[in-house]
Every structure is written in C-alpha cells, then in structure tokens.
Amino acid sequence: MGPALLLLAALTAAGLVDLRAAAALALVQAAGVALLARNRRREQAAAATPPTETAATVPQDFLERLPDPVILLNGAREIVAVNRIARDVLGVGLLGRDLALSLRHPDVLAAVETVLSGLPSVTEEITLPVPMPRTFTLHAGELPPSADPRGPRIALVLRDETRAKRAEQSRADFVANATHELRSPLSALIGFIETLRGPASDDALARERFLGVMQAEARRMARLVEDLMSLSRVEINEHVPPRERIEVDEVLAAVVDTLAVRAAQRGMTIRLDAPNDLPEVVGDRDQLTQVFHNLIDNAVKYARPDTTILVTVLAMQRLPATQAAGVSVAVTDEGDGIESIHIPRLTERFYRADEGRSRRMGGTGLGLAIVKHIVNRHRGRLSIESKVGVGSTFTVFLPSASTPRSGGEGLPQSR
Ligand code: ADP
C-alpha cells in the first residue's frame, strides 16, 4: 500500500474524515507522489525549469478532474499547484505566492501550520466571507516527503457545504414554523377549555360562543396537519414523474363543483372556460385536483365578494421557455392583488403577503408551496401575475401527454 492509501486507511479508520473527502485527499496525495517522480525525472534530465513551474504543470490534468477546490503547498507555504475550481471559488491562483497572501483565512493558515508541525492531517469547518459567505470542510494533509525542498508538502482539499448548510437551516426553520403554527390554536383551545370548566361553567351563552371558536381553532389545526402531510407526501415522490393520462377540464369541473357553494357564500361565481379539443396531460389526478383546488380556493378567499373567478384553459403549441406542447390553466380573480415584492416568495412554506387576512380566512400558508411541488413533479411551471387594486392571475402550465417525456424535458422547474 502506498503512503497515500495508508494515510487514507488510517484517517478513515480513525473516523477523522468522511470517505469522499478522504478519497479526494488520498488521490491528491497520490498525485503528489507522481509529481515528485516526474520532478525527479526532470531533474535527472537536467531540465532548467524552476520547481514551482514544474510543480504547477505536472499534476494539473489530474487536479482539474477533481470536483473540489485543491491547493498544493510547499514547505515554505507557497502555492505550487491549484485546480480551476479553487481558482474560481477561492480566487487563489498565483503559483509561487505565499498562501497567507492568497487566502487570508486564519483557520486555513492555522491548519497548514499544524500539518507542518507534524500532525498528518487536520479537518475543520471554515466560512469564507467573500464574495458571499460560504461554508467549507477543509482537509489539510501531509504529502509524502520530497527530495525537492520546494516540492509540494501539503494538500488542501475543500468541500463546499453551503448548500447542505442551507438545507439544514431551512429544515430547522420549517420545524420551528410548523410548531409555532400549531401552538397558537392549541393554546387557544386549552384556554377556552379552562374557561368553560371554571368561570363560564354556568354561562350557556358563553359556552355556545366559545364552542364555536374552539371548533374553528380545532379545524385550523386539522387543516394544518393535513397540509403538512400533503406537503411531505408530495416532496417524497417529487422526483417520480406521474403516469396517468388526465383530461384537465374534467378535473377542473369537479373542483369548481366542490368550491361553488363556498364561493356562493361570498356572492361569487366561478366560470370555467375550456375548449373542446383539449390535449390530455400526463398527471396524477389527486395531485392536480389539489393544485386547482388550492388556486381556486385562494381566489375565493382573497377576491372581493360578489365578483367572478375566471378559470381559463388553453391548449398551447409551445409552453413558455420550452418547445413542448401543453395546456395552461389560468385562475383570475378580482381581488386586491399582491404587491410585487411578495410575488417571488409566495410559494415558500408559511409565507403570507397579508398575515392577518390569511389567518382570518383560515389559511395555513402552505397551499402555494404544495402547488409548487406538485407542478414541479409534473415538469410544469407556475406563473403569478398580479395588479394591486385589480386582481391576480395564477397560471399553471403542464406539458401534454403527447410530448415525449424523458429526464430533462418539460418546462423549467417553477420556483
Ligand atoms: P394561505 O393558506 O395563507 O392562503 P397560500 O400558500 O395558499 O397560503 O398563499 C400564500 C399567500 O399568498 C397568502 O397568504 C396570500 O397572502 C397570498 N395569495 C395567494 N393567493 C392569492 C390571491 N388569489 N389573491 C391575493 N393574495 C393571494
């Protein structure tokens, strides 16, 4: 076993590095060995090339193939090789330059010092503030000894953890938000139960009123739990494309029937306009029902009373930003509209343009997040247009069933 593999085995066994990063480090260390051998051959051939240049050219092909930023340093902490991704991401480039001048990060410099002082490798998390804050796992490892005093002695391998960190943060935020949303109706219920058992125990009028509020709060919790479960189900199978052939106008007619009573309670009418020769789409009937239900239900919630909600279905030769044919479904309401700063964020979980209104109308803040995920699964797209004081149009674009579908086809994913 070569020294690089020995080191890899030792580090992995000690649980000091994860396998992927260790493999990258070991490969770099193996490249260092190759580099030394090549340097020696060049020296033997009495080539007059300065060592830093030789070092920079020899492992370059190999280093470029690595997916993570890699920097090789000599014992004088000078950069002797660097790959493209390290140049792009970290902005380090000049061979022969002191690392301290290229990458002014105290933890990176400290890791180098630790390895130079005899520890075979160091692993730690670092955050580089510019051009925008990014989190990396840094592995600094010793290379096999070199006959050339200016040859590579230390490999720095960095792995970008920014995305994983963000995902972790967004999961934590989600749990915090969901807990907060459930806590308020629960506190209300507990408060009312205590009042009914205590001060209001003999008050029939209060009892009736409190029971009404309790029912509304309990329903809010039930809706929230239902939406949370829908969201999690949709997310689980988002990467599996649906299989059924669906006639969108049929699904819409059923949704309109379901919501007509609710709309009528606010003096609203829902009008469905669909051509006869509509192509089928490939979809999941229950999920498409949920998409249209959420969009039309929002129109019922947020439009002005005594107005008309228009559901317009069109066959499209070419859906926006793609060559694929498909179907568009636009839900237009006459409401107060949404200010443009909110529009890009409406599909985030628990994001509400008007918090108080959403709660009054029994909203959970999850409806559009569910729509976005289902539309993504259908390789479709959601577009939102709104004019304050006039109303809003939410349009779903879905590729038609006749469109050959594989991997990356369909529409760009919605936000
Ligand atoms: P909610 O349960 O709060 O309605 P959604 O995810 O369905 O949650 O919608 C997110 C937010 O988008 C709503 O709180 C509301 O502010 C805004 N919104 C959605 N649909 C409309 C609409 N048709 N008109 C005005 N605002 C809307």
Image (cartoon, rainbow, N blue to C red):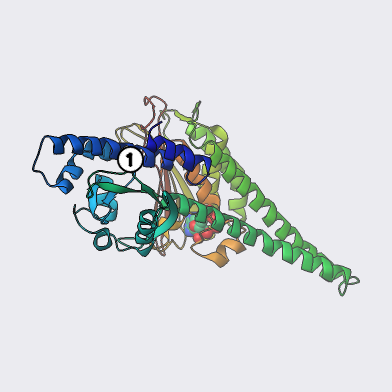
Percent across and percent down for residue 326 are 37, 33
Percent across and percent down for residue 181 are 63, 60
Q: Nearer the viewer, residue 170 or 59?
A: 59
Q: Nearer the viewer, residue 94 or 54?
A: 54
Callout count = 1
Say which element carries label 1. Answer: helix
Q: Nearer the viewer, residue 251 or 147?
A: 147
User: For the residue marked with disc 1, what is the amino acid?
Assistant: Val
Percent across and percent down for residue 391 are 43, 58
Left or right? Give the position of 156 relative to 47.
right
Percent across and percent down for residue 61 are 23, 36
From where the camera sits, is residue 273 visible?
no
Q: Relative to residue 197, is residue 140 depicted above or below?
A: above
Residue linked to disc 1:
28
Left or right? Give the position of 282 relative to 212.
left
Q: Residue furthest right?
A: 202
Residue depicted at 19% across the width and 37% down the height: 40
The 10 Å Cα crowd at callout 1, few under 14, some 14 to 19, many 20 or more, is many
Left or right? Give the position of 76 relative to 312.
left
Q: In which quarter of the image is residue 317?
A: top left
Q: Nearer the viewer, residue 318 or 7?
A: 7
Q: Relative to residue 72, is residue 4 depicted above or below?
A: above
Q: Relative to residue 129, is residue 395 depicted above or below?
A: above
Left or right? Give the position of 41 relative to 375.
left
